[in-house]
Image: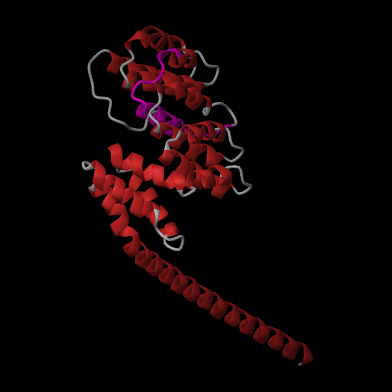
Amino acid sequence: MIGFALSWTVLVWILVVTSVTCVLILLAIVVLRSARRLRTRRHERERARVRPAVLGVLAAEDEEDELVEAVDQLRRLPDAQWPAAERYVLQTLSEVRGSSRDALVGVLVDRGTLAAALRTSRGRGAIARARAAEVLGLLQRPEARRRLVSLASDPSRDVRVVAVRALGTLEDPALTETLLAALAPGADVPPSVVGTALLRTRGADPAALRDALSSPHAPVRATAAAVAGHLLVTELAEPISALLDHDPSEAVRSAAGKALARLGRDGDTDDQEVYG
């Protein structure tokens, strides 16, 4: 009887502890969701307050005097409102071109966004470095470019991936070799990410692609062949043909065959993921 009573007591305590744990978990979920909703609403209110200043810059693109005035208004936003304005401007940059974009980037630089991103990109946290790399890609300044090249070989794979994508947005053929280097063993950047970044240059360096076709690493050879095909780099048809005939990697031969099919006819070169 004593053993039975002890077993029953233990069972009751287990049930009590389990019930309390479940209740605490549910409460934590409710609190987190409520906090998230409150944060979202706060951000929406903050964004509504700064939206006119940002839209003023976008609307004044064709009027120099109006643009100068709108930029000055955005630049002089109070410090309390600037974080919301900064988030809004960064979200807008990828969709804006021309003088409005240049003006918005100038405001971000003046308000310290570039300096903060450069500083954060050297921090300990990989997530923070990845976010900084994304911001640097949006800003597209020379110092941002140099830092992104370094981040493409960051110890964290996630940071490397973001940095490669960001480098692609710079549309600079001179970065071809740097982007292809991200495919080296140990880098672990997906070939599709590197290929897409190379396509965005719309003029990858033919010499760098030619060197990559003889790389000892199959993903490098395959990606170089695919990119050459998509960009219609006809001068590389011969080495790509050699890959099709002799390369030991099935993936490389497949990429070479598809590339030769494109090189044999005209085609569009719309951005798309390649190889992988």
Task: List the single residue furthest toward the bottom.
Answer: 1
Q: Horizontal and vertical percent for residue 146?
A: 52, 31
Q: Is residue 46 visible?
A: yes
Seen in the image, is 26 located left or right of residue 97? Answer: right
The answer to which image quadrant residue 154 occupies is: top right
Q: Is residue 97 visible?
A: no
Taking 215 as reference, is 166 above or below it?
A: below
Q: Horizontal and vertical percent for residue 223?
A: 43, 24
Q: Horizontal and vertical percent for residue 110?
A: 45, 46
Image quarter where the N terminus lies is: bottom right
Residue at 44 percent of width and 38 percent of height: 137
Residue nearest the viewer, comparing 87 with 41: 87
Task: Give the magenta part as a residue range.
Answer: 187-207
Seen in the image, is 149 located left or right of residue 210? Answer: right
Q: Horizontal and vertical percent for residue 164?
A: 47, 34
Q: Is residue 206 magenta?
A: yes
Residue at 33 percent of width and 24 percent of height: 202
Residue nearest the viewer, comparing 19 with 234: 234
Q: Is residue 37 magenta?
A: no
Image quarter where the C terminus lies is: top left
Q: How many numbered marks, from 0 up?
A: 0
Taking 43 as reference, is 250 above or below it?
A: above
